[in-house]
Image: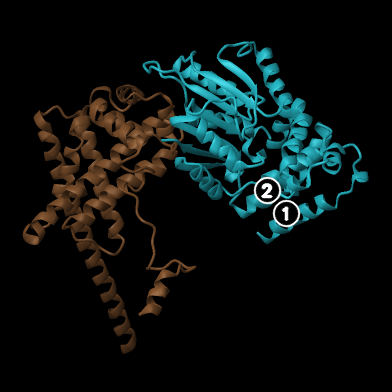
Chain colours: A cyan, B brown
């Protein structure tokens, strides 16, 4: 464990010592950081952006820049970085949730997929419901804070000729922490995959999830987690160091992927996150680690 | 005295006998008797499983009765992953719920019985508990083969829920009965033997057409008798072998000192 600790620390030192002139092609995140004119009182409250500490009011904008940068290469980069395993995780996520209106059930379901701009989870859930339960009634809100990511999802829907201009599927630009266009007690299934990590205030996001869900609804979250096995963890840390390099080769963007790695390391331990889900008011919270804990499915039930 | 109280009030870093986690009402299940899941699963097991069997139709019928939507199925099944051959997680949870609640039911009756009659009654025998557990299967007897198929499907559910639950059942039956328990390897073999006897009795019950399952109980009694007799054979043989072994060693030793 000491070994991985050193790796982690060296990563932090590296990123804080980096000076702009070494990598001039990725200046905009830092530019935002230096040029911002945020009021003094706002900047007192800080949060983490990767391993950097930034004012709370600024994180949202920084994350926005990251995802605007990666949107067009999102799918190919996911495949490269996870060696295709992210497809298995998402498949398992959808099969385990096993949601859909059953043939002899009365009410259709109302889904909401938060931070689901690329649409893969949302479309997967609807496909699962249709193939398994012949459910063509349940509706879906696909919500993302980033309009660029949401456009990727719409593009995908258009290309596959399904769920585009479909009255069942609505794309909405919304902040996951507030979801101010979504009514309280209106949703049956709240899913979020690889998104909650980027929230400025994770607890606020969970509280909002609790607000929009109906009693009997379920919160279901797929997110990076902590690797337990020390040997696998050592390999995983090595692999993480290679990710920004891959990012710069494939997507010509080092910093966005550096942020990705750091945000994974900053995300709370699964037990802590489970505690946060319970704190938001959910019952029977639990989690299932996937691939030695690289990823985990978390859930909670509103009763 | 005050010092002791203060000491007891402190939380210690290492695990100790003073503090322990309060046990959940239905331990392996993540929810208590007042939860939504319990309400739905209990309703399903009582009202719809006898007619529909262990499947999603029974669960959906219950949800319709209780005025709930399909999303509750996801909530019920959250703890399980879909099994091999695509048994839905909610149905796996229903099977687990059946096993756990029925296991608690046999000892619950026992607790109330001993509380009222104290020590006047002789302690319950293993056979009585065994029979009581089989009696609780009567309402779902026609769907037992389906249940056993779900439970024996190779995969995560078998390892994490079905087998441990079977072990807990035989463990409970031995612990709460007058059966003598051993502290050596026989502890394991006894539980395994009783588990085998129970599963074979359930298999028999699934096919049993006799009135009030009379043949099942006959079969179970005989099976259990075999197990206990076999256990005795085993213990006797073991004792004899040890005796012979030690005696031969001593004999050899004495011969060596002589020469």
Q: Residue at x 62, y 32 (%)?
A: A176
Q: Which residue is mark 2?
A: A265
Residue A8: numbered disc: 1
Q: Nearer the viewer, residue B156 or A116?
A: A116
Q: Is residue A243 visible?
A: no
Which x, y percent locates residue A237?
A: 70, 49
The percent position of residue A58, horizontal first and vertical second, equals 75, 40
Q: Subunit of mark 2?
A: A
Above or below — where is B162 with respect to B150?
A: below
Marks 1 and 2: in contact by CB < 8 Å? yes
Q: Is residue B228 visible?
A: yes
Q: Nearer the viewer, residue A35 or A292?
A: A35
Looking at the image, is mark 2 or mark 1 earlier in the sequence?
A: 1
**Is the same chain shared between marks 2 and 1?**
yes
Mark 1, chain letter? A
Nearer to me, B142 or A162: A162
């Amino acid at each position: 464990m000491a070994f991985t600790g050193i790796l982690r620390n060296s990563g932090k030192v590296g990123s804080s010592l980096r000076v702009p002139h070494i990598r001039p092609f990725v200046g905009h995140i830092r530019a935002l950081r230096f040029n911002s004119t945020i009021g003094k009182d706002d900047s007192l409250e800080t949060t983490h952006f990767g391993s950097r500490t930034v004012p709370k009011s600024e994180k949202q904008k920084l994350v926005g820049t990251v995802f605007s940068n990666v949107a067009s290469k999102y799918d190919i980069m996911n495949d490269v970085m996870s060696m295709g395993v992210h497809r298995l995780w998402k498949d398992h996520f959808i099969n385990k949730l096993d949601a859909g209106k059953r043939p002899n059930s009365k009410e259709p379901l109302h889904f909401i997929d938060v931070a689901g701009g690329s649409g893969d989870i949302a479309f997967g859930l609807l496909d699962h419901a249709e193939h398994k339960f012949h459910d063509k009634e349940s509706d879906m809100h696909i919500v993302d804070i980033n309009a660029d990511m949401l456009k990727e999802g719409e593009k995908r829907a258009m290309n596959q000729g399904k769920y585009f201009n479909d009255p069942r599927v609505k794309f909405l630009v919304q902040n996951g922490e507030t979801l101010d266009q979504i009514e309280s007690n209106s949703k049956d299934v709240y899913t979020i995959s690889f998104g909650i990590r980027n929230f400025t205030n994770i607890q606020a996001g969970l509280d909002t999830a609790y607000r929009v869900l109906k009693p009997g609804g379920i919160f279901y979250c797929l997110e990076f987690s902590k690797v337990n096995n020390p040997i696998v963890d050592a390999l995983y840390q090595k692999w993480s160091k290679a990710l920004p390099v891959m990012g710069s080769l494939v997507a010509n963007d080092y910093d966005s992927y550096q942020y990705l790695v750091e945000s994974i390391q900053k995300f709370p331990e699964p037990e802590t996150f489970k505690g946060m889900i319970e704190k938001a008011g959910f019952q029977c919270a639990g989690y299932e680690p996937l691939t030695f804990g690289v990823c985990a499915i978390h859930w909670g039930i509103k009763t | 005295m005050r010092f002791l109280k203060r000491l007891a009030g402190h939380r210690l870093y290492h695990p100790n006998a003073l503090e322990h986690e309060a046990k959940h009402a239905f331990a392996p299940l993540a929810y208590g008797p007042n939860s939504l899941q319990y309400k739905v699963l209990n309703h399903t097991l009582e009202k719809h499983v006898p007619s529909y069997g262990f499947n999603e139709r029974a669960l959906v019928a219950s949800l319709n009765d209780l005025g709930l939507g399909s999303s509750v199925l996801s909530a019920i099944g959250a703890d399980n992953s879909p099994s091999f051959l695509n048994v839905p997680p909610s149905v796996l949870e229903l099977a687990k719920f059946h096993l756990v609640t029925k296991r608690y039911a046999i000892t619950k009756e026992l607790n109330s019985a001993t509380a009222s009659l104290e020590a006047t009654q002789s302690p319950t025998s293993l056979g009585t508990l065994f029979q009581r557990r089989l009696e609780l299967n009567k309402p779902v007897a026609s769907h037992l083969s389906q249940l056993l198929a779900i439970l024996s499907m190779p995969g995560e559910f078998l390892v994490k829920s079905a087998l441990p639950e079977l072990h807990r059942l035989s463990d409970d039956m031995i612990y709460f009965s007058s059966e003598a328990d051993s502290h050596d390897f026989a502890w394991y073999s006894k539980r395994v033997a009783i588990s085998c006897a129970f599963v074979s009795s359930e298999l028999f019950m699934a096919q049993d057409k006799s009135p009030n399952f009379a043949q099942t109980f006959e079969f179970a009694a005989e099976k259990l008798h075999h197990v206990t007799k076999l256990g005795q054979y085993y213990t006797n043989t073991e004792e004899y072998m040890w005796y012979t072994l030690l005696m031969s060693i001593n004999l050899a030793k004495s011969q060596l000192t002589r020469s």
